[in-house]
Amino acid sequence: MLPEISLTIRNLEFRFDKADSFRLWIDQLDHSFCGILGLHGLSGSGKTSFSKLLCGLLKPSAGTIALSMNSGATLPRVGYAPQFPERILLGVQIGDTVRQIASLKRREPDLITLIQKYLQCFSLDFERIKNRSGYELSGGELRRLALALSLSLAPDLLILDEPTVGLGRRGKAQLFSILENFQNDHQIIIVSHDFKLIRQICRHYWILHEGNLIFNGDDETLRSFPDIIEQVGINSLEKYFSQ
């Protein structure tokens, strides 16, 4: 069953330090997740920082950000697939890492079986890579492994940061096929600088520009804001809305 998750933000500010010129600022946002959501913005707009605030990897400099289950019983479990999986996986032995994650989650061997299943969906054989280190995998293989690990943990809300980088056409098609089924029981945020990609699979969009949330809505609403479309580099209404 699809979890009902709400987000509440009030006067959210984030800086890496006081001297940093970058400032993420969202004064107010109330959102109930329903289907795959796209977080779009140009490089440096604050997408990854906002994603890490959502999943608790970063803490606000000021203000509040809170996710809640509409049932009120528990807090939602949030998963995050990073933009640069090689920073985590390069120096580790793949099989050991998978077993450690499964052990920490107390779901071994079920979790290992599920990871193998998702890897197969990405045409990647766990038996072939389990004795390798991350240094021995290509960028695309590291990306598929990180996605398989994130999907197998089955969080209530899964945030995928630039998930298609390095996948190629076939890998993208495989990911979209997986997400089509995954979205039936999990909320998803796709983070990408590629608006065409986001529009292909997302119902609702957030758009960041220079640390500010400048749009919160769907295709139909975005048509009414040509200045925003131009501002974030979506330069042709005809190209994106005539399909």
Image: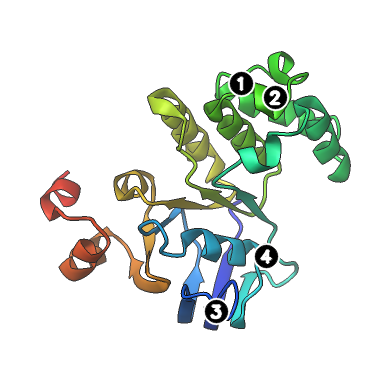
Query: Dot 1: few (<14), some (14–19), or many (≥20) neighbours within 10 Å?
Result: some
Task: Tell me the residue that label 2 is attached to.
Answer: 116
Name the residue: 61% across, 40% down.
Answer: 85
Q: Residues within 10 Å of mark 2 (few under 14, many from 20)?
A: many
How many marks on residues? Answer: 4
The residue to which callout 1 is attached is 120
Front in this rendered view, residue 85 or 27: 85
Tag 4: residue type?
A: Gly
| 74 is higher (above) or lower (below) than 159 | below
Query: Closer to the N terminus: mark 3 or mark 2?
Result: 3
Q: CA distance from mark 3 to mark 4?
A: 23 Å
Residue placed under numbered mark 4 in the picture: 56
Q: Are marks 1 and 3 in contact (CB under 8 Å)?
A: no
Horizontal side of residue 205 vs 189, given as left or right:
left
Circle 2 SS class: helix
Residue tagged by mark 3?
19
Observer-nearest of 169 and 219: 169
Name the quarter where the C terminus is drawn: top left
Mark 3: few/some/many CA within 10 Å (<14, 14-19, 20+): few
Residue 112 - label: none
Nearest-to-viewer mark from 2 and 4: 4
In the image, what residue type sits under mark 1?
A: Gln
Res. 224 visible in picture: no
Splitting the image into 4 quarters, where does residue 211 fall?
Answer: bottom left
Give amino acid for label 3: Ala
